[in-house]
Image (spheres, rainbow, N blue to C red):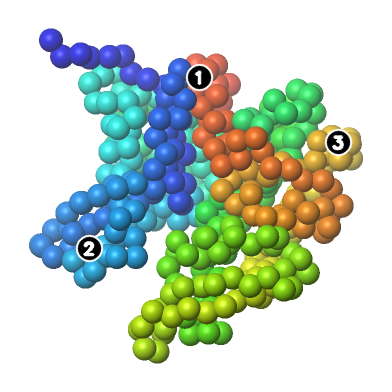
Amino acid sequence: MPNFQLAHDVAVDMGTSNTRIYVKNKGIVVNEASMLVLRTNGRQPQVVAIGDSCEEFVGRANSEYKIVRPIRSGIIVDYENAQIMLHYLLTKAIGSRFYFKPRAVVTIPGLANTVQRQSLINVLGKSGVRQIHMVDQAFAAATSESNRVNKEDAIFVVDIGAGTTVVALISMGGTVASRSAQLGGDLIDETIREHLNRRYGIEITERIAEQIKFDLTDVREDENQDRVIVVRGRDKATSMPFTQDVKTSEICKAIHPILENIIGEIRQVLERTPPELCRDIMKNGIILTGGCAQLPGLEALIFDELGIPASIGREAEEATILGAGTMADHFDEVSSRNQTVSQNG
């Protein structure tokens, strides 16, 4: 007889860079690139790779293959391919033989509008999810880091992902103030690529730009004056392999406006903080989560600019999915207190 199982409760975080799926009682079981590769030389494009299996095509794809990223700034921009990707990853996480469809806690950036939220609901529904509870990304990240502070204290979280930065002040199980902006690792990478292209005529891949970003010793300009890195890419004029020595201080200068904008988002939330919660923030500091939380020297830059200590979360890169996973572990309790969407079928 077929080995059918009851449905699982899951958490889903469809990020710009990676999609993560958490299964109740198992933890994170899928953490793969939010990416598909299509073969485009036929009448209908055919999917040839999804998730991490797309990595071998990055920087090597030709006219026959197209790399598709259906998520931008945490928002679905390609409905059909997002549904194909999510269905594949959900099946990989929980299998396909179930009496009941799964229930899901899904993260969403605070900047998402009603249409974008409905698009996410539709993709989840078509991927086989029967009940959906949506949670703000920052709230999910704060939930995962709440064990670091007294349960009665407010927690200030800055989640810096690939496409979005979310700043939120959480207290007593609710969001007091929050801000979302399309600032993140992808914009930093693109800025590095554009700077090197414009100044030296060198073209580099997204992967090399990301490596440069994390190879910096400190994102503050005055900490990088004499350090030089070797950048390998392609000469824009001749298309030949090209190597260029670059000072890290000029990379820091190029990305500084983005970091200043992130700090500006933090400042705006701080300005809306009730006086009675300021003590908690000064005591516990600002907690950094997301893929770019570990930018070298970012904590020091925030302290220099705002006078408030900052620290990297214990599970910084996976804080959002772990927080959503905690809610999935108690789905009935969470859904009874908050709005949950049921899918037909």
| Along the viewing direction, whichever of 106 and 196 lies nearer the viewer | 196
Image height check: is 197 above or below 162?
below
Q: Which mark is residue 301?
A: none
Q: What's under tag 2, amino acid-wise?
A: Tyr
* Residue 272 seen in this snapshot: no
Q: Residue 197: where, in percent of width, then height? A: 50, 80
Looking at the rendered image, the disc whose residue lies closer to the viewer, 1 or 3, is 3
The earlier-in-sequence mark between 2 and 3 is 2
Point 35% across, 24% down: residue: 102
Image marks 1 and 3: residues in contact by CB distance under 8 Å:
no
- Label 2 secondary element: strand
* Residue 300 seen in this snapshot: yes
Point 48% across, 85% down: residue: 201
The residue tagged 2 is 65
Residue positioned most to the top: 1
Q: Residue 172: where, in percent of width, then height? A: 74, 26
Q: What's under tag 3, amino acid-wise?
A: Lys
The earlier-in-sequence mark between 2 and 1 is 2
Please state if 94 lies on the left or on the right of 187 as rendered.
left
The residue tagged 1 is 329
Q: How many marks?
A: 3
The residue tagged 3 is 283
Residue positioned most to the bottom: 237
- Label 3 secondary element: helix
User: How much space separates mark 2 and mark 1, taking CA atoms?
Assistant: 40 Å
The earlier-in-sequence mark between 1 and 3 is 3
